Image (spheres, rainbow, N blue to C red):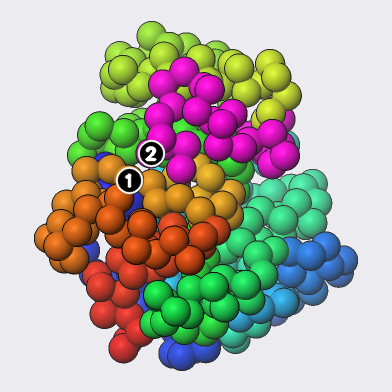
Amino acid sequence: MPLDPGPSSPPQPSPAGGGGSAPKFGTSNPAPPLAGDGRGRGHPAHAPAGQNAALLELAWPIDLALTVASHGWVYLEPWRWEVETGTLSHVERIGGVIGTMHMTQRDPATLAIAWEGFAGIDAGEILRRAARWVSADWDPATAVEVLGAHFAEEAALIARGGGRILRCSTFYEDFVKTILTVNTSWSGTCRMTAALVAEPGGGAFPEPAAVLDYGEEQLRQIAKLGFRAPVVATATRRLLDEGVIDAAGNGDLDRLDHEYLLSLKGIGPYAAAHCRMLLQDFSRIPVDSVVVAHLREKHDTTPDAFIAARGECGLYLGLGYRLMRLREKFGVPDL
């Protein structure tokens, strides 16, 4: 199943080094100061009436539009991307409260975060989720160095703020959406995701308990997950029972290794590798039929041969390949 959707116009990257397209906030409702925690530092900002806002200061440049373009997640509910304003939005449920978060690029090292509807929710949790979207805690220096020999143009993309793969606010949302890409068309993935957000999510992606309450039968018959219904239900139960995810869907990173993911019933090499990539493990290419076809048609090679020829890329091989696909599809870095 492709990581990219079908024909579409790409989200436009910011000018070299990021920044450029983000609208400026108005006044009122400043968010409280937020302490830095390695994922970027939060500071108060101004927002339009009815919104709160803060600035996420980054340790390394991040290009928001390149991150949005990194794969097809942005086309799945409940994401929204407004090309004209460069605004990325996501409906969230935090502590039982539903609201919407928005992210725009202020400059290469600063992202502006605004939100509404989260009465009583600590701003630190909102900033933590926003930071996860763009992997604000990831240090790209080693990747740039390692990829330089075989993926020079891709390494340059990382240096200017690319290299992040858009992630959802929780591991669980990424995990279930990955399952929904298996053995289906992209339109099928979009349809199943929208069904989960509508019911049982109630407008946001459902938390694990809501999926279990909904039950395998409704996952199959109403959300139309088909054979994926028992995979989602069984994996959700095990992840919760073993304490690998919490009630909100946040994952225990020390326990979500490749072998553990493969031990989950119905999770194969492609899904495990894709989930690990979204946990910043770039050592594998999530190989599916689209990857096989891409390498055959564009590079006259096979996945095994492609991987063997780039063994020096080691822990960053999957990232190099992902950025090569991005560059070929959207014409980056010439944009």
State the quadrant of the C terminus: bottom left
* Main secondary structure along the magenta-highlighted residues: loop
**Viewed as shown, does residue 183 lie left or right of 236?**
left
33 above or below 91? Answer: below
For disc 1, the marked residue is: 287
Check if mark 1's residue and mark 2's residue have beta carbons within 8 Å.
Answer: yes
Q: Quadrant of residue 25?
A: bottom right
Q: Nearer the viewer, residue 171 or 315?
A: 315
Q: Which residues are magenta?
A: 246-273
As rendered, which of 141 and 16 lies closer to the eye?
A: 141
Q: Secondary structure at mark 2?
A: helix
Q: Position of residue 176 (x, y in %)?
A: 46, 33
Assess whether residue 254 is covered by the magenta stretch: yes
The answer to which quarter of the image holds residue 320 is bottom left
Q: Label 2: how many residues lie within 10 Å, few (<14), some (14-19) or many (20+)?
A: some
**Image quarter of the N terminus:** top left
Report crowding for label 1: few under 14, some 14 to 19, many 20 or more residues within 10 A (C-alpha): some
Q: Is residue 64 visible?
A: no
Residue at the far top: name it.
217
> Marks 1 and 2, Cα distance to the nearest angstrom?
6 Å
Mark linked to residue 270: 2
Residue 245 position (above or below residue 14): above
Examine the rendering and report whether any part of residue 183 can be seen. Answer: yes
Q: Amino acid at mark 2?
A: Tyr
Left or right relative to 176: residue 259: right
The first of marks 1 and 2 along the sequence is 2
Amino acid at pointer 1: Val
In percent of the image, x 40 and y 29: which residue is there?
A: 268
